[in-house]
């Protein structure tokens, strides 16, 4: 773990200043932050830009900082790898650490430091090359001045030296760093010719792996501090409910329990360790009041009613006249698709450490939303931001769950009441499952019409769902209220259909919703990729060929689709009872097509045998990491497709732990084959790109194997797994 | 009440409630945080340690049940077999978020202790209790096969 302290020295202009932004805290931490109530103050103060904020060169080696959360996606390797390339470093000698929260490290297009949307490499590739190139030029200039030679006769070369080839002289970066840092950075750094890349494009070893193999990697749950107390908490299981009464005595009677703390909607037990804290929590019988009493059936009915009536629906894509084309089409089909709420279920339950003392606060947390976390804590305590120190730890999984700051707020409020002692909050798995911000459940109605040749001439899609941007990024809502995240994957399918209408009906429900790996595409691609399969079926066409022919003007879609079909042996004979299904989707600047192969086994069940994926993510900075992310996204998608669901009864989540909320185990794993399309295009997204295709590919394969068309998830509901 | 046991080769005395799960004795009592909490009900395997060489879910194992026994955690995995597993894990670049990996490594080392040449089915049987939300299962299989091969020489 490395500490990052926000201080004046660290705040350097460079990546541009953050503009004011509005954030909404979950109100889970208490009554302090209510939706819409919080506007942060001015951005971080400016300073002079220096690439040496990113690179620290000393006699012991080079440290490169990365401005993203390492949650398994490999940014602590891929981002420094980009910079190290331009700086002509040897990879083995590079150390890495999270960057502090200065303005120097906040991307101008993002305005806040976060790790989401598969953006880290996609957005930072060019800026980090410029940082590395600037540092390299300054080091070369420093050497030229030292030698009193023309700068163009000197050059940087691996491993981290400046040389004067004509005389054979050379100086190490360590000898030059101080002088280089005093020079003015070049306005337009000269980037390396990609043909000379030595590091970018290679499967360099991850910097975080050794510590994750010997147990020394520090997650927030692992932070140890003198005088540390441990807390666990419970919030009203009913959405929106409050704590009415709590008899603290049973918990206080347990040895090791130090305090029982009551808040508006939750309580916490603080103890000498997690075990007494949990025993204390289990000993209590809180009385809750108010809140929702909704259940899953009522939620489905509300979504269906809103989608069916079309009241207050917002049009998000219109091409031609879909209604007229549908009416005039030769053959028509209509279908309703539904997907459930999904939990993130990170392996590390929510956790954070806080110490509130002497008018300041220190936090140790794994977060996908660093700027907001920092700001949130300052606001929660009513203290200046420069009194809040953020120590970033590894994240035991993110997937969008650690884009929220609710658990951090709880840790801070608990620590505030423990008189300067540091407190580590660890949620139980049960609390983690019940108190999520879930991938929204959606209801979808689609209509398609074919002409006499079987070509689609009309496509309509109406989505009924909650808005997730309304809470997490309201400024990103369109002026008419359209949630663009909710329609990703529905508005950008690649099929050339002359008449299209896509609409979204917002439904307000008490279930907290948030960003879940690949966000809108995760549910919408299931719907669109299954429905295009239905159109192919209606047309009597091969589902791969049908898609391919409609991908006019989408060469990257078509290329991944073609290669996936080829690698999967599309069209070649399969054993009886087997079937193949295909799906393709673009998500966050990456294109992926997948072919699933399933086998119908006795008892009406199916087994997923093989998944073939082809990804076009532009230039793959680190192919091994990219491949791992595709495998990861497929496993994540399989868990969701096969078993994933959060259901609600009496206004509360019904699932609690991995016994009633299963995720994929190793013995349920199909063979996964990943192919990365070679590309010289700019790097695109990676981490979330390959989740959306999984469920539709598998559902379409089930249709191919059994003739059964499944239109709702998870597949377990249909008795096939 | 005190409980004596051996942890990573050292004799240790724990002065804790005897019902305390071994997981929390290790993490909070001894500062051995490599062993992780994931579920508390032996469903995820993140807490896997060796007790007398057997892969054991420490989250449901009270310390009174391990009195006088030998406990090895990921921090103390110093056998040739353990080292071979860790090397194979690095070679195959298995971890992503890494939170489950101590449990994976410990389960793999225990598997290889009893089975020098595990089949895919053996690997599935030994590893199916250890969940990985990042989906590193494919590389786990690769690493276990590589470690087995390295140990067989």
Image (tube, coloured by chain):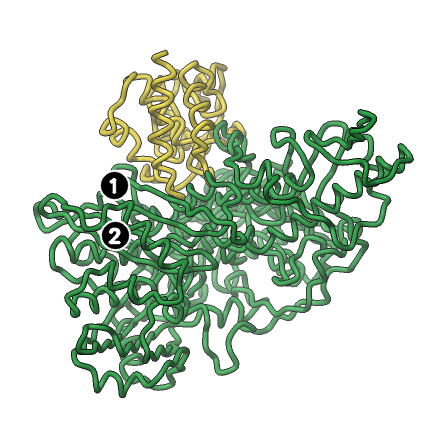
Chain colours: A green, B yellow
**Badge 1 sits on which subunit?**
A
Disc 1 with disc 2 on a shared chain? yes
In which quadrant is the N terminus of chain A drawn?
top right
Where is residue A241 drawn, in percent x and y?
A: 42, 67
Residue under numbered circle 2? A642
| Residues tagged 1 and 2 counted as in contact (Cβ below 8 A) | yes
Residue under numbered circle 1? A668
Q: Quadrant of residue A702?
A: bottom left
Q: What element carries label 2?
A: helix
- Figure check: A79 above or below A511: above
Q: Total number of numbered labels?
A: 2
Q: Residue at x 35, y 34 (%)?
A: B60
Label 1: how many Cα within 10 Å (few below 14, some 14–19, many 20+): some
Where is residue A283 drawn, in percent x and y?
A: 40, 48
Q: Which mark is residue A95?
A: none
Where is residue A370 drawn, in percent x and y?
A: 60, 54
Q: In screen coordinates, is A609 left or right of A385?
A: left
């Amino acid at each position: 773990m490395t500490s990052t302290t926000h201080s004046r020295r660290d705040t350097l202009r460079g990546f541009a200043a953050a503009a004011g932004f509005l954030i909404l805290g979950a109100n889970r931490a208490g009554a302090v932050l209510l939706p819409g109530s919080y506007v942060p103050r001015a951005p971080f103060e400016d300073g002079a830009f220096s690439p040496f904020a990113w690179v620290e060169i000393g006699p012991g080696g080079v440290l490169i900082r990365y401005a993203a959360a390492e949650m398994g996606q490999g940014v602590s390797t891929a981002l420094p790898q980009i910079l190290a390339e331009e700086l002509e470093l040897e990879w083995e000698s590079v150390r890495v650490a999270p960057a502090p929260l200065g303005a120097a490290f906040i991307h101008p297009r993002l305005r806040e430091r976060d790790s989401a949307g598969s953006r880290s490499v996609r957005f930072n590739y060019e800026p980090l090359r410029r940082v590395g190139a600037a540092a390299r030029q300054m080091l070369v200039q420093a050497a030229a001045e030292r030698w009193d030679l023309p700068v163009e006769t000197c050059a940087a070369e691996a491993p981290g030296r400046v040389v004067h080839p004509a005389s054979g002289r050379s100086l190490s970066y360590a000898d030059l760093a101080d002088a280089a840092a005093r020079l003015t950075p070049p306005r337009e750094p000269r980037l390396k010719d990609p043909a000379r890349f030595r590091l970018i494009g290679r499967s360099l070893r991850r910097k975080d792996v050794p510590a994750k193999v010997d147990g020394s990697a520090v997650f927030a749950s692992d932070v140890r501090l003198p005088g540390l107390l441990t807390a666990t908490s419970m919030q009203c299981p009913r959405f929106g409910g409050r704590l009415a009464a709590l008899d603290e005595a049973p918990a206080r009677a347990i040895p090791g329990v130090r305090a029982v703390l009551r808040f508006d909607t939750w309580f916490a037990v603080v103890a000498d360790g997690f075990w007494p804290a949990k025993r204390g929590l289990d000993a209590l019988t809180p009385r809750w009041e108010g809140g929702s009493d909704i259940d899953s059936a009522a939620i489905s009915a509300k979504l269906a009613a809103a989608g069916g009536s079309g009241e207050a629906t917002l049009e998000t894509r219109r091409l031609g006249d879909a209604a007229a084309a549908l009416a005039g089409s030769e053959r028509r089909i209509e279908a309703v698709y539904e997907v459930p709420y999904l939990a993130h279920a990170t392996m590390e339950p929510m956790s954070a450490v806080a110490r509130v003392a002497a008018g300041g606060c220190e936090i140790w947390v794994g977060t996908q939303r660093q700027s907001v976390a920092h700001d949130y804590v300052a606001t929660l305590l009513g203290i200046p931001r420069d009194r809040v120190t953020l120590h970033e730890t590894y994240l035991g999984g993110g997937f969008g769950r650690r884009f929220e700051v609710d658990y951090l707020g709880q840790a801070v409020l608990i620590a505030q009441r423990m008189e300067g002692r540091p407190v580590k909050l660890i949620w139980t798995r049960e609390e983690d499952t019940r108190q999520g911000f879930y991938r929204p459940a959606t209801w979808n109605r689609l209509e398609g019409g074919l002409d006499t040749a079987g070509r689609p001439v009309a496509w309509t899609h109406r989505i009924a769902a909650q808005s997730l941007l309304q809470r997490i990024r309201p400024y990103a809502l369109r002026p008419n209220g359209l949630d663009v995240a909710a329609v990703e994957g529905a508005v950008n399918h690649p099929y050339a259909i002359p008449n299209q209408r896509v609409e979204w009906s917002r439904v307000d429900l008490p279930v907290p919703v948030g960003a879940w790996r690949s966000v809108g595409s995760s549910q919408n691609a299931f719907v669109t990729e299954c429905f295009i399969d239905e159109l192919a079926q209606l047309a009597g066409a091969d589902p791969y060929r049908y898609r391919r022919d409609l991908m006019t003007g989408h060469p990257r879609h078509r290329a991944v689709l073609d290669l996936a079909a080829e690698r999967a042996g599309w069209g070649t004979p399969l054993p009886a009872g087997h079937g193949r299904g295909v799906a393709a989707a673009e998500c966050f600047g990456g294109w992926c097509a997948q072919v699933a192969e399933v086998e119908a086994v006795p008892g009406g069940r199916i087994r997923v045998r093989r998944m073939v994926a082809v990804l076009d993510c532009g230039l793959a900075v680190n192919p091994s990491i990219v491949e791992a992310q595709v495998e990861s996204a497929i496993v994540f998608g399989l868990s969701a497709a096969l078993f994933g669901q959060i259901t609600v009864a009496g206004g509360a989540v019904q699932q609690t732990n991995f016994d009633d909320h299963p995720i994929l185990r190793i013995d349920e794993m199909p063979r996964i084959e990943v192919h990365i399309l070679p590309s010289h295009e700019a790097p695109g997204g990676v981490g979330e790109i390959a989740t959306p295709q999984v469920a539709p590919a598998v559902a379409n394969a089930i249709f191919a194997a059994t003739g059964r068309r499944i239109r709702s998830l998870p597949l377990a509901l249909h008795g096939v797994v | 009440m005190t409980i004596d046991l051996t942890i990573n080769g050292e004799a240790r005395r724990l002065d804790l409630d005897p019902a305390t799960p071994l997981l929390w004795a290790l993490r909070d009592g001894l500062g051995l945080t490599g062993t992780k909490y994931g579920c508390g009900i032996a469903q995820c395997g993140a807490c896997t340690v060796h007790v007398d060489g057997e892969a054991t879910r420490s989250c449901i194992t009270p310390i009174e049940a391990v009195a006088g026994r030998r406990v090895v955690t990921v921090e103390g995995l110093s056998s040739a077999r353990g080292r071979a597993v860790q090397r194979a894990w690095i070679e195959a670049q298995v971890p992503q978020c890494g939170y489950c990996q101590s449990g994976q490594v410990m389960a793999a080392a225990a598997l290889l202790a009893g089975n020098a040449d595990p089949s895919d089915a053996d690997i599935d049987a030994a590893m199916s209790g250890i969940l990985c939300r990042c989906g590193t299962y494919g590389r786990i299989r690769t690493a276990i096969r590589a470690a087995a091969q390295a140990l067989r020489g």
